[in-house]
Amino acid sequence: MDPKTIVTNQKAWYLEGHTKSYDFRKDQLKRLKKMLNIYEEPILKALKFDLNKSEYEAYAAEIAFLKSEIDHQLKSLKAWMAPKKVKAPLTHTGSKNFVQKEPYGTVLVIAPWNYPIQLAIAPVIGAVAAGNTVIIKPSELTPTVSWVIKKMIEQFFDPKFIAVIEGDKEVTQELLDQPLDYIFFTGSVPVGKIIMEKASKRLIPVTLELGGKSPTIVNRDAPIDLAAKRIVWGKFTNAGQTCIAPDYLLVHHEVKSKLIHAMKKYMTEFYGPRPLENPDYVKIVNDSHFERVSSYLENGTVVAGGGLDQKKRMIEPTILDQVTWSDQVMQDEIFGPILPILTFDQLDEVIDQVNSRPKPLALYYFGDDEHDQQQIIDRISFGGGCINDTLYHILNPHLPFGGVGESGIGSYHGQSSFDTFTHEKSMTKQTTKFDQNFRYPGSALSLKIIKKVLG
Ligand code: NAD
């Protein structure tokens, strides 16, 4: 079916009201979970084939993440759906005032390739919980996963409710020309701008989950060994192809060599002395990304890793020292297993440097002094992050996840997903038992009363 027909059918079916009841939403969320259970093996195999993800990494970061998101929605859905009573001023005496939670209608979810199952299905969970119909456009760069997504969704759901359209940017552009009710995009900053421009033609609301360069700051009072362990984990998981991975390090010059030494220890502990031969080490998604990421090895000095295997499309976990802000590796989002290091003397200097660049999606700060921690939280704008850890904030369903400025618009996960896909319809249900005359022209009391009540 072509994009136009799918959108037309979904919109008509939505207007028939099928998706609105609590029971329907609950059953469909359970169905999504059943689908993930039944398709667990094909999903794991597809992730291995497209990205060489290990079973552990694939299960934890993709399948388990989605199942716990479904459970979280199921637990609170009824309460979130309930109309929210609000107070009213004296002028509204006799009326009932409430916010009605209304689905948008037909939602388009556009997904990237780096966590191709999680990032395609997590927004669907929110959209379904909120009572919408959904069209998923998976990434064409992970074609096996894209095929599995299409197959499992088609087996479990009517395309009038959830449909999958595979393809590249031409297909996406065609979808974006349709009268959608909401667009949820996860991907790069340049494509995010294209999506927003397209959406603006029809004034379609958007969530943009984008990327950028996420700094990791290590101060001299940081617990260095633990910081090294958590940074190595956050950076090299999925071979650095994680939107919230530490992109680069800003390290106090007094602790730099100690930190590098400890990071090397953990790189070997986690990936072995020869990561390119590690059967579980994730590969780079395609040749052009391999070329792009490996070109950064020309910047600075390699102090750990640096090895490549073009045939396997693998790049060793690598640390680059002697890097400057003007090097290419500090201009682009790296999105690969290369970690450049810059040094600093004063925290103020770091705050100024980060603030002079686009607002990051994530920021990580390592250091024990609480005043310094608070300075980072108060003075730098970024999507979200951790003090003394990396990535962990994304695993808490009670925290909204999203960017700010160039790293994105809007957020999701947990209640934030439900809210994202829900329009808050403001209602006043007026009494007909009496009528207060002060609002009408000619009422002698009107100006006096309005001044008294409204100020
Ligand atoms: P991308 O922007 O190239 O592609 C994302 C999606 O957009 C794909 O489905 C693709 O087919 C589609 N697309 C590509 N070009 C298009 C165009 N011109 N018009 C319409 N659609 C188009 O991103 P990617 O390479 O798949 O993913 C990597 C990027 O995504 C990184 O920047 C990363 O930081 C970001 N990302 C962000 C998050 C987040 O949650 N904020 C998560 C993962 C990845």
Image (cartoon, rainbow, N blue to C red):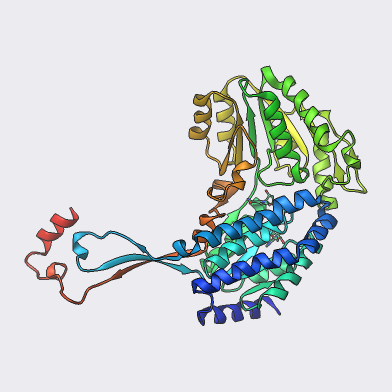
Q: Position of residue 302 (x, y in %)?
A: 83, 29
Q: Position of residue 30 (x, y in %)?
A: 61, 67
Give the residue displayed 51% in from the left and 55% down from the top.
Answer: 416
Furthest residue toward right: 311
In the figure, is residue 154 to the left or right of 264? Answer: left
Q: Is residue 448 above or below residue 383?
A: below
Q: Is residue 311 visible?
A: yes
Give the residue displayed 76% in from the left and 62% down from the top.
Answer: 40
Q: Position of residue 149 (x, y in %)?
A: 73, 66
Toward the viewer: 61 or 212?
61
Q: Is residue 300 visible?
A: no
Regarding ligand 1, which quadrant of the image does it lie in?
A: bottom right
Toward the viewer: 383 or 278?
278
Give the residue displayed 61% in from the left and 71% down from the top.
Answer: 177
Quarter in which the N terminus is drawn? bottom right
Q: Is residue 213 above or below residue 225?
A: below
Q: Position of residue 366 (x, y in %)?
A: 61, 29
In the figure, is residue 122 to the left or right of 314? Answer: left
Image-quadrant location for residue 339: top right
Give the residue displayed 60% in from the left and 73% down from the top.
Answer: 178
Q: Is residue 343 above or below residue 43?
A: above
Label total for image: 0
Furthest residue toward top: 254
Toward the viewer: 192 or 89?
89
